[in-house]
Amino acid sequence: MHAEILKGRQIYIVFPLIEESEKLDLQNLQNGYEQLLQYFPQPDFQISVVHGRMKAADKDWEMQRFISRTSQIMVATTVIEVGVNVPNASVMIIENTERFGLSQLHQLRGRVGRGADQSYCILMTDYKLSKESKERIATMVRTNNGFEIADADLKLRGPGDIQGTQQSGLLDFKLLNISEDRKIMDAARHLAIMVIENDARLEKPENINIKNQVDILRRKNKDWARIS
C-alpha cells in the first residue's frame, strides 16, 4: 500500500461490517480505520470513509475527496461495488472475503484496473474456510471473466426459486441439472423455437403430442404471462 501511494496511486479497503459485532467475528470498518491511522498518520495521509449509514451529502463529499486525490485511501463497505470510477486506484483489499458472494467480489474487484497501471486485488480471509468459500476464492484467483464467474456462482449457489422468494438453492427438477446440462437445454430451446416458427398453434399431426403435453402443463402451472 505504501509503495503504491508513493507512486501516486490510491487504495480501496472494503469491510463486511461497519461496527464491531457481538455475534460475528469479522473485521469492521471502524476498527480498521483506527488501525490504518497507525500506519498512515495524518496529515501526511488522508483517509476517506464511506458506508451505507452516512447521509448522501457526506458520502458524496468523501467520494469527491477520493476522486480529486485529496485522500489516498478509501475505507468502505460494499456501497462502492458499483458506480465508482477512479482510474488512479490500483489496489483493492477485501477483508473477510469469505463473507461475500462471487458476483459481489467480481463487482468490487472491478473498481481497480480501470486505468493503464498494474493493479492488485488482495483477498483477506479467516483461517477457517468452508469448502464453498475456498471454491469461491479459487474462482476469483483463477479468472476475471464475468461469464465464467457467473457460471461458477450458479453451480455453487443454485438458481433459486422463480415461483418464490428463495434466491439460491437448486430447482426441483427430477433429471435436469441447470449448471451441467446446458448443451441439452440449448438444444431443447433451439428445437422449441423451430417447432413454434413452423407451427405456432401446434396443429400439425407431428406436433399433437407436444400440444397435449402443453395443455396439461398449462392447467397445472402458473401463467407467468399474466403476472406484471
Image (cartoon, grey):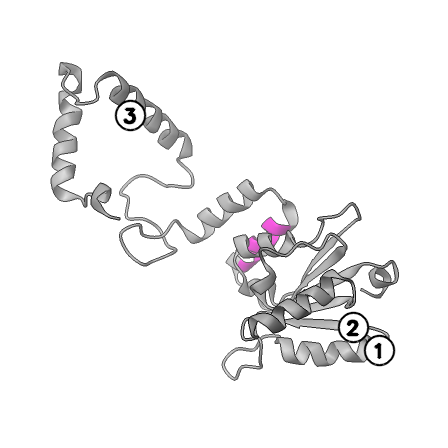
**How many C-alpha atoms fall within 10 Å of the one at disc 1: few (<14), some, or many (≥20)?**
few
Residue 75 in view: no
Magenta-drawn stretch, dominant element (helix, strand or loop): helix
Determine whether, in the image, residue 221 is placed left or right of residue 32: left
| Residue picked out by circle 1 | 43
Residue at the far bottom: name it.
22
Q: Nearer the viewer, residue 55 or 209?
A: 55
Q: Is residue 104 left or right of residue 228?
A: right
Distance of label 1 from label 2 (alpha carbons): 7 Å
Residue 85, quarter of the rendered image? bottom right
Tags 1 and 2 in contact by the CB under 8 Å rule? yes
Name the kind of residue labelled 3 in the image.
Answer: Ala
Q: Which residue lies at the image location 40% right of the left edge and 50% below the top edge?
A: 158
- The amino acid on which the numbered mark 1 sits, given as a three-letter code, is Pro
**Where is residue 28, by image quadrant?**
bottom right
The residue drawn where x is 32% and y is 48% is: 171
Amino acid type of the residue tagged 2 in the rendering? Gln
Residues 161 and 71: in front is 71
Q: For mark 3, what is the residue?
A: 192
Question: Which element is circle 1 on?
Answer: loop
Q: Which residues are magenta?
A: 133-140
